[in-house]
Amino acid sequence: MENHSATGETMDRRWPQLRKFLVFQIKLYIDVFRDIFLSFLSFGAFIIDLIQMNTGADSYFEQVLKFGYGTERAINLFNQYGAEDQGPQSVDKVLRKMEDKIRSRKK
């Protein structure tokens, strides 16, 4: 019985670092998919802007850049933004909700 308790204590001590690693990995994958999506989206926006001769802040390409900036905050890959700077939905908030649900089911 003592061994099981010691194993639980070891996991409790290691969990914060493991959680940080897992969250970073999830965010990396989300960031990769976002980058691929933005690459195609920006190419299309640029072509449309060329054809329609759109320029300035209202061009489709600039709108893609604004969208990308918002997703950068929502993903918060390197935790450079605080919770108040991430907006109403963020990867951190979604993962925290998922973690809370998993913990509540274990009890």
Image: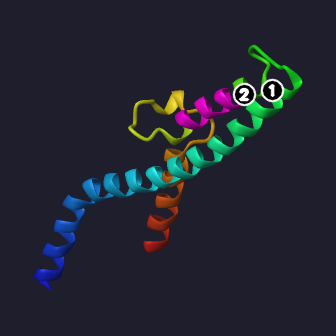
Front in this rendered view, residue 69 or 62: 62
CB contact under 8 Å: marks 1 and 2: yes
Q: Quadrant of the C terminus?
A: bottom left
Residue 21, picture quadrant: bottom left
Q: Which residue is mark 1?
A: 49
Q: Residue at x 38, y 50 (%)?
A: 24
Question: Considering only vertical position in the picture, is 45 above or below 40?
Answer: above
Between the residue at mark 1 and the residue at mark 2, the CA separation in whole angstroms equals 7 Å
Is residue 10 left or right of 82 when viewed as pictured?
left
Q: Residue 13 location in percent, x, y?
A: 19, 59
Is residue 4 left or right of 55 when viewed as pictured?
left
Q: Point out the residue furthest to the bottom here.
A: 1
Amino acid at pointer 2:
Phe
Q: Residue 84 location in percent, x, y?
A: 52, 28
Front in this rendered view, residue 31 or 56: 56
Asked if the stretch drawn in magenta spans residue 48, the answer is no
Q: Which residue is mark 2?
A: 61
Return the mark for residue 89. Answer: none
Q: Residue 97 location in percent, x, y?
A: 53, 54
Question: Considering only vertical position in the picture, is 95 above or below 52?
Answer: below
Residue 46, picture quadrant: top right
